[in-house]
Amino acid sequence: MPGKITRRNALFAAAGAAVLVGAPLAAHHSTAMFEWGKELPMKHATVDKWEWTNPHTFLYVTVKERDGQLHKWALEGMSPNHLTRYGWSKNSVKPGDQVDLTYYPLRDKRRGGFNVTITKADGKKLWQFGEGGSQTAKAQAEGAKK
């Protein structure tokens, strides 16, 4: 009978709505929030937390800044799957580790960014994009200079 809402039709409608609403939540975000290719150093940071999670890893550190105060930073990284190919693991860093790192800063100047490298106290260096760095970032930086 036309116009009649059956249980089956209601279930199909609910399933369709869930897919439409959920799709944007699963979408990957852009890197536009970072000053991609503008690599900055951060010296003498203390690791607070290392999150080995999908779709991105997160490194939380505390660092003494020029004002003499300790400040917390949050740095996004590549996925565990990607980092594994470059020698990283969930045990690469742990709370209390002293590290030097490089990062692409957030455009809005908050204390955060995209982690590029970590140099551990023993001198071991880990790269997000391999020892050669990000070829995409290099190309973007060269394009910005033109």
Image: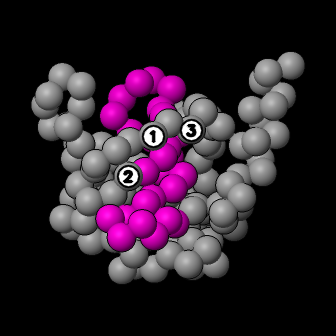
Disc 3/disc 1 C-alpha distance (Å): 7 Å
> Can see residue 6?
no
Name the residue located 68 percent from the left edge and 55 percent from the top edge.
133
Amino acid type of the residue tagged 2 in the rendering: Asp
- Provide residue 136's location: percent of width, then percent of height: 77, 47
Residue 46: percent from left, percent from top: 23, 55
Label 1 near label 2: C-beta < 8 Å?
A: yes
Relative vertical location of residue 122 with respect to residue 17 in this rendering, above or below: below
Residue 41 is labelled as 1
* Magenta segment includes 98: no
Three-letter amino acid code at the position of disc 3: Glu
Q: CA distance from mark 2 to mark 3?
A: 13 Å
Q: Residue at x 39, y 75 (%)?
A: 92
Q: What secondary structure is found at the residue carrying circle 3?
A: loop
Residue at point 43%, 51% (across, down): 101
Residue closest to the far front: 123
Residue highlighted by disc 2: 100
Q: Answer whether labels 3 and 1 touch (C-beta < 8 Å).
A: yes
- Identify which residue, 19 or 61, lies in the foreground: 61
Mark 2 vs mark 3, foreground winner is 2
Instruction: Kindly identify which residue carries mark 3.
Output: 39
